[in-house]
Amino acid sequence: MKGLLSTALLFCLSVVAYADDAETINQNMVGYWAAFTQPDLARAASYMHPEDLAMIQQEIVPVFLEAAESQDAETRFMAETFFQGVPEGSRSWMTGEQAFIGLNLVLRAGAPEAFEALRASTISVTDVRFTSSTEAIVYYDIALEGFAGSDMERLGKLQDQWYLRSKEPVQDTVEQFRQLLLR
């Protein structure tokens, strides 16, 4: 009987912990979306998983450093956009946050109308599913003028904090930019 009570107590505590985590994930998703769409990219970066930011910094910065030396004006423009606000002598030592910001500045420059439309969007978290004690998926609805849709994001827990993970593997993003910029 004592073992059954202990098991029941542990189960109840884990349910409470997952409920708290689900609320935190909900708040993080809404906070990230608000920051990303305003755009407050530095604040949006604070919601990203530190491992993903480090990978972005390590992998994407060299691609844009090489692109900055290109003879192609459009490629150099994209590199200048990526490095916006970063002194030339400091570009090799950009932080993950700076690289995240630069990458999003390039994406925004390529599709300004789409990102402007996002400013008026809202999201509503519809579900949080835990795949493990340190991984989760958040499902949400997006509402834009004349458009409604659904999407999902992966999250990872690190040192008791939940962070959004990159939508696609960082290596895939790097390869896409490598092909675009260094063709």
Image (cartoon, rainbow, N blue to C red):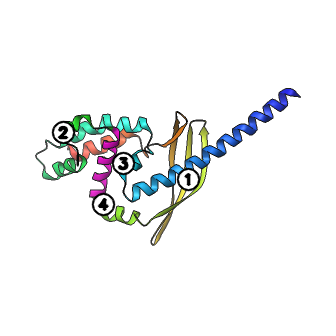
- Frontmost of labels 3 and 1 is 3
Instruction: Nearest to the eye among marks 3 and 2: give it.
Output: 3
CA distance separating discs 4 and 2: 23 Å
Element under label 3?
helix
Q: Residue at label 3?
A: 42
Residue at screen point 32% across, 65% down? 113
- Whichever of labels 4 and 1 marks the residue nearer the N terminus, that label is 4
Residue 107 located within the stretch drawn in magenta: yes
Q: Nearer the viewer, residue 159 or 130?
A: 159
The residues bearing labels 4 and 1 have C-alpha atoms spaced at a distance of 25 Å
Judged by its main secondary structure, the magenta piece is helix
Name the residue type under label 3.
Ala
Pointers 3 and 2 in contact (C-beta within 8 Å): no
Residue type at mark 2: give it: Glu
Asked which quadrant contains residue 54, the reply is top left
Distance from disc 2 to disc 1, alpha carbons, whole Å, reads 37 Å
Task: Identify the secondary structure beneath mark 4.
Answer: loop
**Residue assigned mark 4:** 111
Q: Magenta region: which residues?
A: 96-109
Is residue 140 or residue 160 the one in the foreground?
Answer: 160
Give the residue type that dot 4 points to: Ala
Question: 10 Å neighbourhood of mark 2: few (<14), some, or many (≥20)?
Answer: some
